[in-house]
Amino acid sequence: MKKLLIVDDSEIIRTQIRQCFKDSFSAIHVAKNGKDAVDKVKAVQPDIITMDLTMPEMDGIKCIDEMMKIDDSLKILVISALSDNATCIQALKLGAQGFLDKPFGDKELKEAIQIMLEEG
C-alpha cells in the first residue's frame, strides 16, 4: 500500500480527499500549507501528493518547486479552483503530473490518482 499526502488549506477539501481514499492508502498525511507540506515530504516520503495552489505561508507553485528539489520522482496532482492556464502550465513544468479543477467529484479524483499510480 502507498502513502498519500493531502496539501490544502481547506479542512473541507482535506476531509473529502481523506474520505475518498481511506481504504486505498496505507497512510494518509495532511498539510495545511506549502511550508508544512515540504516538511511532511521529508518526513513521510509520500507516493502521491494532492496539491492546492492557493495557500498561506507558501503557495502551491513554490511548494512544488521545493518538493521536486527533495525528490524529483514525486507524483503530484494539482487540485485547484484557479482556472489560470499559465499557473497550471507552470505547475506542470515544475513537475506536477496532473491537474483537477475544484469542485471535483470522488469519481474524478479516484480516476486521476489511479492514472498516476499506473504510470509509476
Image: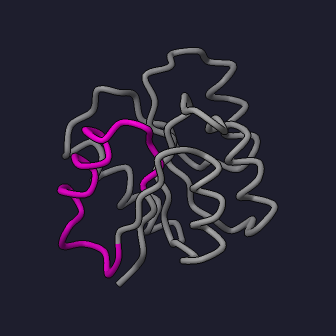
In the image shown, does 20 or 44 lie closer to the viewer? 44
Residue 26: % across, % down: 32, 81
Where 80 falls versus 117 (above or below)?
above
Q: For residue 20: magenta?
A: yes
In the image shown, does 43 or 23 lie closer to the viewer? 43
Q: Quadrant of the C terminus?
A: bottom right
- Residue drawn at (32%, 47%), measured in percent from left and top? 14
Q: How many marks?
A: 0
- Residue drawn at (73%, 31%), measured in percent from left and top? 90
Report whether 65 appears left or right of 57: right
Q: Quadrant of the N terminus?
A: bottom left
Q: How is the image coloured?
A: one colour
Residue 91, picture quadrant: top right
Where 43 falls versus 41 (above or below)?
below
Residue 32: % across, % down: 47, 47
Which residues are the magenta region?
6-27
Residue 64: % across, % down: 68, 48
- Residue drawn at (40%, 28%), measured in percent from left and top? 101
